[in-house]
Image (cartoon, rainbow, N blue to C red):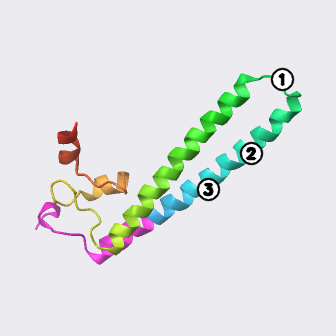
Amino acid sequence: MSEQDLVKYSDADLAEFKELILSKIAKSQEELTFYHEQIKSAGEGENNFNNLEDGSITQERESMNQVASRLIKHIQHLENALVRIENKTYGICRETGKLIPKDRLRAVPHATLSMEAKVKQK
C-alpha cells in the first residue's frame, strides 16, 4: 500500500511531525524575541539623534515589524498544525482528501494542501 492510499498518518508519523513542528515553533519564537528586542532598541536609539528626522531608522523598524508579523503568522500556522495532529487530521489535503506526501510536510509542516490542489488553486 502506497502513501497515497492511506487515509491518515500513523501515530508514529504524527509524533515525528509533532517533534518537527515543535522545534520549528521554538526556533521561530527565538527569532521573534530577537526582532522584538531589535525593534525596542531601535526605538530607544532614535532618541540619541536628538529627534532628527532619520528615515533609515524608521524604515528599518518597519522592516523588522514586517518580519515579526510574518513570524507571528508562521507560528500560528504551526500551532494550527499541532491541533490537526491532536485531531488526527494532520497531513490530509483539505481539497482532495488525500494524504499530503511526507516530503512536502517535512518542507512545509503547516501545509493543508497537496501540490496537486495547490497547483489547481493558481
Residue 6 placement, left or right of 105 = left
Q: Which mark is residue 61?
A: none
The segment highlighted magenta reads 1-20
Q: Which amino acid, mark 3? A: Glu
Q: Which mark is residue 52?
A: 1
Q: CA distance from mark 1 to mark 3?
A: 32 Å
Vertically, is 53 above or below 94? above
Of labels 2 and 3, the one closer to you: 2
Q: Residues within 10 Å of mark 2 (few under 14, many from 20)?
A: few
Of labels 1 and 3, the one closer to you: 1
Q: Nearer the viewer, residue 24 or 95?
A: 95
Q: CA distance from mark 2 to mark 1?
A: 18 Å
Quarter where residue 42 is shown: top right
Q: Nearer the viewer, residue 56 or 13?
A: 56
Q: Which element carries disc 2, helix, strand or loop?
A: helix
Quarter of the image with the C terminus is: top left
Q: Which amino acid, mark 1? A: Leu
Residue 92 in percent (x, y) is at 23, 62
Q: Residues within 10 Å of mark 1 (few under 14, many from 20)?
A: few
- Residue at the image point whose x is 15% and y is 68% from the top: 6
Residue 89 placement, left or right of 79 = left
Q: Is residue 48 magenta?
A: no
Q: Do labels 1 and 3 touch, CB within 8 Å?
A: no
Q: CA distance from mark 2 to mark 3?
A: 15 Å
Q: Which mark is residue 30?
A: 3
Residue 18 in percent (x, y) is at 40, 68
Q: Is residue 11 magenta?
A: yes
Q: Which residue is mark 2?
A: 40
- Residue at the image point whose x is 37% and y is 56% from the top: 110
Closer to the chain start, of discs 2 and 1, is 2
Q: Nearer the viewer, residue 50 or 111?
A: 50
